[in-house]
Amino acid sequence: MTASAVKGGKLIALTFDDGPGGYTNGLLDGLAARNVKVTFFMVGANADCYPNTVRRAYNEGHQIAQHTYDHPALTTKTNEQIAWQLNTTDAILDRVLGQDLDYLIRTPYGDYNDRVLSQIGVPNILWSVDSCDWQLLNAEKVCNQIVSQAFDGAIVLVHDIHRTSIPGALNAIDILLDYGYEFVTVNELFRRRGETLQNGVNYYRCKPTGIDLGGLTEPSFEIKNGELAFTNIDPNGTLHYTIDGSAPTRHSPVYSTPLSLYNGTLRYSVIASGSQTPIRTFTVTENGNLFRDVLMTDWYFDEVDRTMTLGLFQGVAEYCFAPNDGLTRAMFVTVLYRLMQKQGKDTEVSDVNHFADVPQGWYQTAVSWAYEKEIVNGYDDGKFRPNSTITREEMCAILDRTLRYLGEETKTTELTFADSETISDWAKESVARVSAAGLILGQNDNTFAPRNTATRAQAATVLLRLYDMLGAK
Ligand code: NI
């Protein structure tokens, strides 16, 4: 077989029915590795069970569509039952995605009649290539079935609830990419051909029309001079955005000039007739930070924003702070070290080889400094365990020794937490001194939860108080 090197001419839409399920994440991994977008016709009951998978599929640019709540043959159902099947699924998907979107439907078993079509109120997307994966249950045969029947404009039926369908489909993708096919979502297949989907009509394929309006890509953005500016805006669509938390639609403001920074929510999408890019949601801050996972309403919003602005913390991934993740010993000491640098304290290190399990890398200097200043100890086995998470009482012990190193006068108060009893003996005095210094507070219910892992948000709050305490001198 000769592979065609020409790309972009032939469009094909892979569709996955009946999930999501336990195999869907593996499929998403494979699709991401190939940068291929597909469409999922999800069963509402399963979407309810796998909300993270639904969100992941959406965020990675796949189209989310529906396949009723529990997969009945709709011709056997009353109009009311049909409405319930569709509305329930629509509501589940909206809730899981935090959006108010329209979802294409595929009627289960491809079963329909005029009454069903008049009831569904959206286009009914059927298929022209059947992988027969539920019968074959064999990856190689599924792959052959897809490849041998593929054509430009085909809609391919696969099910992501069968283990063998995942490698079968991914292998077929590899071969068809080699043949010059481009994989697109159902909405994109029709939009790019200049076709408009009609409600209550069956679609099996999208015949080539000689038209290709080109792909719809997401913009990038940059923060410069106190403004947020979008770049690379796709001319095939219009960039709409909102700052009030609502989902952007074609009625939302059109982006034209850079936005002044503000504390709030930014949502945007490039919208074209019949299709749009995934709606992206960020918390924007006046300081120019953007977060996917920190909300204005979170108790730690200000603290996380300030620690990022000061450069004490870095995100764990692009625009992600992971506020509720546990903090590791290496992370905590690294932030403490940065804090000392910013406050002009002595951060000289004489030797970096104190621990066998602290390799050269981002935290080696910080750990060595903390060890030499007697702020941290190793364990009895001579190890530091940099990747162990730190408990709240351990955090207090390190902070207590930090205060001593800094020559801060510390007092101690009686512990009045409801669970003071559960604080380890070795940590009791440290907790008392660190709370008397105002660095750490109890939780809302006046418990201290000494053995709980300190979260990144909690550590940001505590370290910011230390930063301010030192800066105030
Ligand atoms: Ni089905």
Image (cartoon, grey):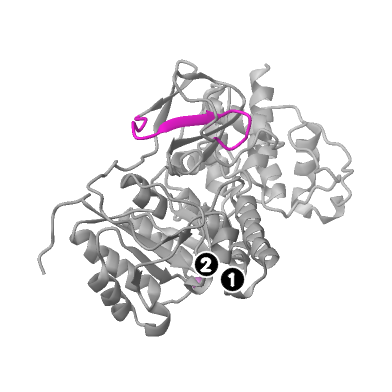
Q: Earlier in the sequence, mark 1 or mark 2?
A: 1
Find disc 1 in the rendering and name its residue: 74
Residue type, label 2: Thr
Secondary structure type for disc 2: loop
Nearer the observer, 82 or 358: 82
Residues tagged 1 and 2 counted as in contact (Cβ below 8 A):
yes
The three-letter amino acid code for the residue at tag 1 is Leu
Label 1: which secondary element: helix
How far from the left and from the top, in percent, is residue 367?
A: 51, 43
Magenta residues, as a range?
232-248
Whether label 2 lies within 8 Å of ligand 1 gets the answer no
Mark 2: few/some/many CA within 10 Å (<14, 14-19, 20+) = many
Per the image, is 466 magenta?
no
Identify the main secondary structure in magenta.
loop
Disc 1 packing (10 Å; few <14; some 14–19; many ≥20): many
119 in relation to 308, above or below: below
**Residue 387: in sight, yes or no?**
no
Whether 239 is among the magenta residues is yes
- Residue at 35 percent across and 33 percent down: it is 234
Residue 329 in view, yes or no: yes
Q: Is residue 262 above or below residue 378?
A: above
Q: Which residue sits at x=25%, y=49%? A: 209
Q: Is 196 left, or right, of 378 in this rendering?
A: left
Q: Specify whether 167 is left or right of 18.
A: left
Residue 89, picture quadrant: bottom right
Q: Which residue is mark 2?
A: 107
Q: Residue at x 41, y 63 (%)?
A: 15
Furthest residue in direction left, as rendered: 2
